[in-house]
């Protein structure tokens, strides 16, 4: 009897052990399955996030509203196409060195344009959003785009007013109302400007032209090119020397 009971107990113990081993194996299998599912879900979530972010970026840079009256290579042109000298100016409305360049050269540029010697191609960009607390570079360029879109003849005066009233770096830029007031002062219609300024209608365009300038090798503002050659010195004498040389070459 004792021998039979011992055999039965041993057999039951073995069955219990097999069941325990099977349960552990099943638990491990479930853990692996759950872990694999979680890993797949993480990959899917990350992929969706990347797609969404890329879509937002693409929407901002390629599908954005583009202002009318923009010339080739995102230029806002002052002067005749027949001018023998083309001056390209990359500027940021928050850039203090751009304001200095404009103050030193504005009258000379105007004289050259009036004489038919020079065409100025302004290519404003928005490099310096981090230099203000309210993305002033983007907001001011968006406002300039609104002016070009509805009142292109007012652009140059608006451009000059922005540099003459440039806010200091590190703080808030001009308010939307101030931008609108300067646009109206330059000759634009408030009714046509206000919505574009307040809604940042051309924000995506500002991102696109800024990205294009980077791809073109522009790494700072102001960048000034005379017939395709970038100037190393941006003082009035250096600019005049470069333009005089270009006019001589064109004779």
Image: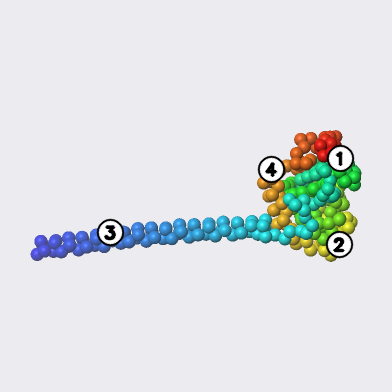
Q: Mark 3 points at which residue?
A: 21
CB atoms at circles 3 and 4 under 8 Å apart?
A: no
Q: Mark 2 points at which residue?
A: 189
Question: Where residue 127 appears, x then y in whole percent?
Answer: 72, 47
CB atoms at circles 1 and 3 under 8 Å apart?
A: no
Q: What element carries label 3?
A: helix
Q: Is 33 situated left or right of 249 in this image?
A: left
Of badges 1 and 4, the one in the foreground is 4
Q: Name the residue under label 1.
A: 104
Q: Is mark 1 on a helix, strand or loop?
A: helix
Q: Name the residue under label 4.
A: 217
Of badges 4 and 2, the one in the foreground is 4
Q: What element carries label 2?
A: loop
Quadrant occupied by the C terminus: top right
Which circle's residue, 1 or 4, is located before the other in the chain?
1
Question: Where residue 182 appears, x then y in whole percent?
Answer: 86, 55
**Looking at the image, which residue is at 20% across and 60% down?**
14
Q: How far apart are marks 4 and 2 (CA)?
A: 36 Å
- Is residue 176 visible in the rendered structure shown here? no
Between residue 168 and residue 77, name the one nearer to us. 77
């Amino acid at each position: 009897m004792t021998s039979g009971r011992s055999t039965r107990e041993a057999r039951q113990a073995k069955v219990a052990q097999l069941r325990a081993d099977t349960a552990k194996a099943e638990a491990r299998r479930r853990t692996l399955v759950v872990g694999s599912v979680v890993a797949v879900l993480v990959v899917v979530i990350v992929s969706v996030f990347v797609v969404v972010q890329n879509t937002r970026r693409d929407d901002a840079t390629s599908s954005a509203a583009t202002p009318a009256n923009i010339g080739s290579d995102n230029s806002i042109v002052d002067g005749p196409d027949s001018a023998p000298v083309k001056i390209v100016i990359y500027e940021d409305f928050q850039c203090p060195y751009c304001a200095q360049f404009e103050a030193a050269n504005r009258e000379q540029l105007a004289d050259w344009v009036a004489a038919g010697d020079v065409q100025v191609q302004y290519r404003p960009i928005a490099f310096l959003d981090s230099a203000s607390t309210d993305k002033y570079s983007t907001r001011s360029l968006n406002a300039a785009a609104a002016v070009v879109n509805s009142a292109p003849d007012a652009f140059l005066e608006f451009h000059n007013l922005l540099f003459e009233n440039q806010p200091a770096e590190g703080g808030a830029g001009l308010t939307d109302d101030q931008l609108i007031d300067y646009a109206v002062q330059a000759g634009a219609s408030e009714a046509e400007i206000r919505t574009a300024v307040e809604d940042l209608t051309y924000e995506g365009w500002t991102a696109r032209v800024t990205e294009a300038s980077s791809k073109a090798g522009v790494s700072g503002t102001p960048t000034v090119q005379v017939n395709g050659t970038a100037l190393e010195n941006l003082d009035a004498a250096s600019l005049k020397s470069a333009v005089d040389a270009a006019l001589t070459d064109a004779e």
